[in-house]
Image (cartoon, rainbow, N blue to C red):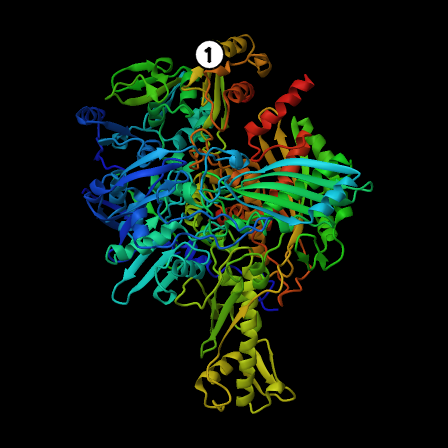
Amino acid sequence: MSETGIGQRVKRKEDHRFITGKGRYTDDINLPGQTYGYFLRSPHAHATIKSIDTSAAKKMPGVAGIFTGEDIANDKLGGLICGWMIHSKDGSPMKAGPHPVLAQGKVRYVGDHVAFVVAATKEQAKAAAAAVDVSYAVLPHNVDAAMAMTAKAQVHDVAPDNRVFNWSLGDQAATDAAFKAAAHVTKIDLVNNRLIPNAMEPRAAIGSYDSGSDHFTLYTTSQNPHVARLVISAFHGLAPEHKLRVIAPDVGGGFGSKIFIYAEEVACVWASKKIGGRPIKWTAERSESFLADAHGRDHVTHAELATDATGKITGLRVNTKAAMGGYLSTFASCVPTYLYGTLMSGQYAIPNIYVEVDAVYTNTAPVDAYRGAGRPEATYVVERIVETAARELKMDPGEFRRKNFIKSFPHQTPVIMCYDAGDYAAALDKALQIADYKGFPGRKAESAKRGKLRGVGFSAYIEACGIAPSAAVGSLGAGVGLWESAEVRVNPVGTVEVLTGSHSHGQGHETTFAQLVSDRLGIDIDNVAIVHGDTDKVQFGMGTYGSRSGAVGMTAISKALDKIEAKAKRVAAAVMEASTNDVEFKNGTFTVKGTDKKMAFGEVALAAYVAHKFNSAEIEPGLKESAFHDPSNFVFPAGVHICEVEIDADTGVTEVASYTAVDDFGNIINPMIVEGQVHGGIVQGIGQALTEGCVYDKESGQLLTGSYMDYCMPRADNVPSFKLGFICTPCPSNPLGMKGCGEAGAIASPAAVMNAVTDALGVRDVPMPATPQVVWQVMQPMKKAAE
Amino acid sequence: MENFAYHRPASVADAVAAMKKAKDGKFMSGGMTLLPTVKQGLAAPSDVIDLTGLKNSGISVSGSSVTVKAGTTHVDVATDKGIRQVVPALSALALSIGDPAVRNRGTIGGSISNNDPAADYPAACLGLGATIHTSDRKLAAGEFFTGMFTTALKPAEVVTAVEFPVPAKAGYAKFPNPASRYAMVGVFVAKLKDGSVRVAVTGAGPAVFRVPAMEAALARDFSAKALAGVTVDAKTLNTDMHASATYRAHLIGVMAKRAVEVAK
Amino acid sequence: MPAISMKVNGQVVTGEVEARTLLVDFLRSNLGLTGTHVGCDTSQCGACVVHVDGRAVKSCTALAIACDGASVTTIEGLARNGTLHPMQEAFREHHGLQCGFCTPGMIMSAIDTVNRRGKTLDEATIRHELEGNICRCTGYQNIVAAVQAGAAKM
């Protein structure tokens, strides 16, 4: 195995530019003649727009154009789409209200897009926006998922009760029967708090139009530039795909929030033509990111778990209300359905499961996929109720889980998924050992001596990622296929360019993908370049989300490399005057069986391009291959996380005292990068559990957590260092045996933390985020009882 | 952010003159509060008068007092060896303000002139009974801090220094707002050399305030247990999403005890 | 517009700015030094940290005009003759970055920490010193490791 091959802790190739300040993010790019766009946003949660007067604003200095919903309508620019059709259990399609790029007649949340002002400078655009006169008639609003179906506010005409769909999964009758026969039923009510993604790079876009070639270019902070091009082309109808280039250069984090096609980038590229082709740059201020990036989570759930007399789980019933916000964002509808209900079996053999979800409109920013997307919500339900059941049954939470683990594979759950491989008990054992679970009582006693309450919590999560088999998701309503593509270009000197449809915004693809190539072709990793993020360079691709770039994206590269190897063998055979069947390729060298003939990979590459030594009627010159990979199944990373917290009873402050994560990601390309993904995911989950919560004021509909002054991002001193461990059951559905690692930490950790918090306090539930005030409030009745 | 005229006077007299001429001027020292406020459009001064040109920074420690010139940054207060010897609570307080980059630029004069209800320095000033020196006069801390974001400063009056008496012992305990890290409750306790005790609370109310009941209890017995049962009325305290008035009232009790425990 | 002059990464630069122009905008727009980033509008994320006269400063909360005559170091000015600063090297060595957006500010803050607190830094000190720098990717663990190692080599 080479030092840069699969499984090695290779230092990242992309780091040099980032640590020297030479990264190139969208806002770092400036085009000649560039103007600046600014969005005038709704100050109201819900209102009709009576009139918009732009006449004074248009006369302001530097203004190049001011656009409203009327201009959008006049140009017949298509609305923003939701690309996953969900049907209610009565068979009716989801009720998707109109989602124009700029509001038409009505605004549906604070921050909704009312007008787009373009001027020579950002300050001029802002000043002109302040001079746009909008007259609103305020309507009743509702920001609460639980209240949506009975609220006075009616967000969209198509959904009189604000219900987008009433979806179900599983066998209700069989599940009800299981509950009737149960020896014990555990019930729990949970709120999965709304989160704001907060990638550190705010979203940005530069749209430009070249009238000479009738061609548009969009630089944008996207996790999937080809999908953006497809949507802007096919649904907004702005330009056919060959006349629209979308470039997503360095992107500063996404976590899902940069998957979606938003009003802002569409407006930039559309309006550029309206102002005569001058480029328009828009960069979100952080306060805009809070208002108008798609948020995550926001579920209200009641769940029940049935167990028999031996402690075996016999049934699970879940009822969830999921907020969608004021509009359906790009993939909003699949998050609380097929990315949620399908994971309700967790790691357990549960014979009967029934899930029902009401997705509802609220007067808030749209909700869509955020790191984990549906799977953290599912894990939170399953792992909180399993832990609660163990406590009620007076069983050790680890042993209760072990008793109910799925032990043989493949395992078909009652909720669609077929788990292909895993060893849940092995992960549990390793986690118990790393966490020194046996030593917990001693640590609890020691904490008590210092006046602190210590608790321990488990989370045995599973997720389905490597998104996703196209036919499977198509049958469930997806509007797109979720394959990935790769093109491997071998240059005549033997260096390699890989064009991938995956997009790296922190994941380190330039390194891990190059490791695969280096490993397969036996060439120096520095001779491999990974090209991504530009629709003019890369063939079509589906982008990066759902922990798919390894399992799907790298498999596509692997398939293309298979073809490269096969072609190169034919070239080598011709040059070495041997039969192709006798040519072997190992460690970068082609040899002929039974002879001492050999050629280095670079020599074969050169021969392929020089094309003197073979009959080009039989072998085409050149060495370039492409592949599309459509996975045959999801992949199923799983693991056991154990968290210990310490609570200061005087103040309610919760500290994560220790955190152990044991994960099964199958085969790992670069452990250093995988560990980094786990660290980051865990902290996002700890953030959800302890610090982060998006709050809209019920009375006014205003976003109260609109900046870092009030939205509590985890900082370095909020978290400890983590203890990680890995087990490996290779994934059988892809040749590299990889699962996905990007979301696991965020999926597992909220339940682990909250199980620990409730254990420390000896209560059934503490709402997330368990801020000091929340914990203190929970403790008040306990203190009174003690007195 | 609206534009403004910028001045950087080299003397207090010039600074005062520039302010008098300005239509709606603001003094700026480190700018740690003013600039974010202007960026958010919450203030739009016609003139910004930058006081860093006064080069009015420095710390002098005598046996009975510590004088910090108005332009002294938080980091310089936090790391000053003299202060650490005679009022370590003041070093600790300065070290708890904002973050390192804020401490590198923010100044004591700017902090107290702004009198943010969640700022730390007002607690030290009131808790130690400091004297505020201005371009015109000397004011006791108790007279200086008049309300939320308001002080006794006249429109064209500049703080030039803060003079703290050296106490017998003092302590500061801060419970930060989890998001902003400003004080949600900060309690400064001091036992002065004349035997009197002062307890000043920041972050919890509209402006820094003293707690006479705690002062009386600690005057009898300067120990955490002396504060048992001494409560603060929640009625006058702030409520926001991070802390209700009741929770703040509770935290004042906890932080007061902790401040006494760390006092030296 | 007022003219200002300062030394940036050892070079004397001049420019005309509005009074309201922030240092970060002067660096990014006037000088094209886009390594310094803007991640928030409330002076909290730290992506914009640079050194002014040897001290870490949030360049989104400093007027360019107030830095007239100052000496400014940005992330672009750390490497000398192609040799990375030990702190830069440590971030790469310890995988202290993922998307890279917070990284310049992190590195500048880390160096400031070493300047003030010395080369031997424990984990708790580093975590406390980084409270003005937010990272969403790394979970901080590898940043802490990088700062500790980078400090030791400075």
Q: Can residue A432 be spotted in the picture?
A: no
Amino acid type for the residue under numbered disc 1: Lys
Question: A316 above or below A250?
Answer: above
| Residue shown at 63% from the left, 41% from the top | A319
Residue farthest right in this picture: A310
Relative placement, left or right, of C80 versus A390 is left
The answer to whether A500 appears left or right of B161 in the picture is right
Disc 1, SS: loop
Category of crowding for the residue at label 1, using alpha-carbon neighbours closer than 10 angstroms: few (below 14), some (14–19), many (at least 20): few
- Image quadrant for the N terminus of chain A? bottom right
Chain label for disc 1: B
Is residue B108 something that shows in the picture? yes
Front residue of this view, candidates C97 and A312:
A312
Tell me where residue B231 appears, x and y as whole percent: 54, 13
Image quarter for residue A570? bottom right
Q: Which residue is at the front of the view, B222 or B3?
A: B3
Question: How many marks can you see?
Answer: 1
Task: Name the residue beneath numbered marker 1.
Answer: B193
Q: Horizontal and vertical percent for residue A230?
A: 42, 61
Q: Horizontal and vertical percent for residue A514? A: 52, 66
The quadrant the C terminus of chain A occupies is top right
Query: Looking at the image, is A539 positioned above or below residue A11?
Result: below
